[in-house]
Image (cartoon, rainbow, N blue to C red):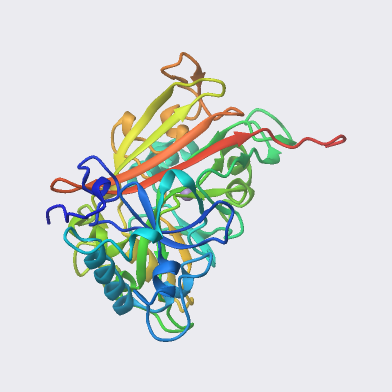
Amino acid sequence: MPLLKSWVETANDPDGDFPLNNLPYGVFSVGGDDPRCCVAIGDKVLDLAALEAAGLIGVQGEPVFDHPFLNEFMELGAEIWAQTRSKLQDMLADGADPKAITPALHAQSDVEMHMPFIVVEYTDFYAGRHHATNVGTMFRGAENALPPNWLHIPIGYNGRASTVVVSGTPIRRPLGQLKPPDADAPHFGPCKRLDIELEMGAVVGTGNRMGEPVTVQEADDMIFGYVILNDWSARDIQAWEYQPLGPFQAKVFASSISPWVVTKAALEPFRCSTPEREKTLLPYLQEPGPMLYDIDLEVKMQATGSDTTTTLSRTNYNQMYYSAAQQLCHHAIGGCEMSVGDLLGSGTISGPEKDERGSLLEISWGGKEPFTLDSGETRSFIEDGDTLTLSGRASGDGYNIGFGTCVGTILPAIEKENW
Ligand code: MN
């Protein structure tokens, strides 16, 4: 599919993230007014609540866009998603009359972006083979790198929806129990091995009922779209707490998402297959078609006090061993109810090469191989004041489907006396 030309000139920039082909959804406010739903087009946001109030878009019944979240729109289902997308594309297409639409456009530089949807529950997976192999090698040795279930099950754990935040939100360094390998007992204090995890998040748009499992195809149909996700991690807290029930405090202090939810419709031309299976999956987990996406991903780091940004890693979502549809199917297969606004983290996305790793734990190999930033500082993990920026885009024929950025700066831990 070529670039769809728009009368919004900046949407036709071949290097831009937000052409008419994309139209990702978000929630914005301008000048401190009430947050409401929008789409991105070029360097603008389009106020969907205003279009709905003017009767230019919408379905019969209550307005769905005049809310600080997308959940009510997502809940309407795939047919309405498709109709709305098609209507917006017609209105914004080159040759359409801009007159009624122009008042609802705002410069992206003038608006504040908010959480795009209410995260009802958050589940994080561990479905990147290179990441799981690297981490498993560090934690348990090369012989036991992949647990025996890994090639059969998309492994996951239930995270916390309460601490999923939008890009730009500062992240407080967590406190917790730490036990260095040579210590006899743990001590309490600020995390010293603070890390990122480069992930994609799948946003569930329609749910299933408790006790009613879904197929992989049905799971794919339930997904509304995708975000960039930084699953911040406290590696020292994790190493001490994780057996036998998996991560707990190490993962619940923050997860950041991009402000834009890129729809499955926009990503359709970039579908690709998961890698070849080493072990045949049980039939319920087999994909009826390509359900992964070719999305280039990047991690950048800026040290505290520096104005130089260093690219640490470049990889691709197509490196995952399991797709979000497989993960969602597996999640629901035992009878678990999945809801509108459920967020599924893909698991850290690393490629096979050193400069394709999606966490600092892997890049610095557990802190044994510190790396040097372009500004001269060395790092193994994140220091207070450092800024991490994750981004992603799928590149088509003369256009990109961009996700924008997922940014976070680390604040020092809160310390109190007698801790
Ligand atoms: Mn994770």
Q: Position of residue 64 (x, y in %)?
A: 46, 75
Q: Position of residue 29 (x, y in %)?
A: 52, 56
Q: Position of residue 383 (x, y in %)?
A: 58, 27
Query: Which residue is most to the bottom?
Result: 61
**Which quadrant is the N terminus positioned in?**
bottom left
Residue plotted at (33% across, 56% down) = 151
Query: Which residue is most to the front?
Result: 99
Residue 231 lies, with reference to residue 94, above or below; the image says above
Residue 243 lies, with reference to residue 338, above or below; the image says above
Query: Can the viewer see residue 186?
Result: no
In the rendered image, which quarter is residue 90 located in?
bottom left
Q: Left or right? Give the position of 46 relative to 123.
A: left
Q: Position of residue 328 (x, y in %)?
A: 39, 67
Query: Which residue is most to the right?
Result: 418
Residue 340 lies, with reference to residue 225, above or below; the image says below
**Which quadrant is the C terminus positioned in?**
top right
**75 or 349, which lies in front?**
75
Query: Which residue is most to the top?
Result: 376
Residue plotted at (48% across, 68% down) = 341
Residue plotted at (26% across, 57% down) = 292
**370 or 133, which lies in front?**
370
Residue 81 lies, with reference to residue 124, above or below; the image says below
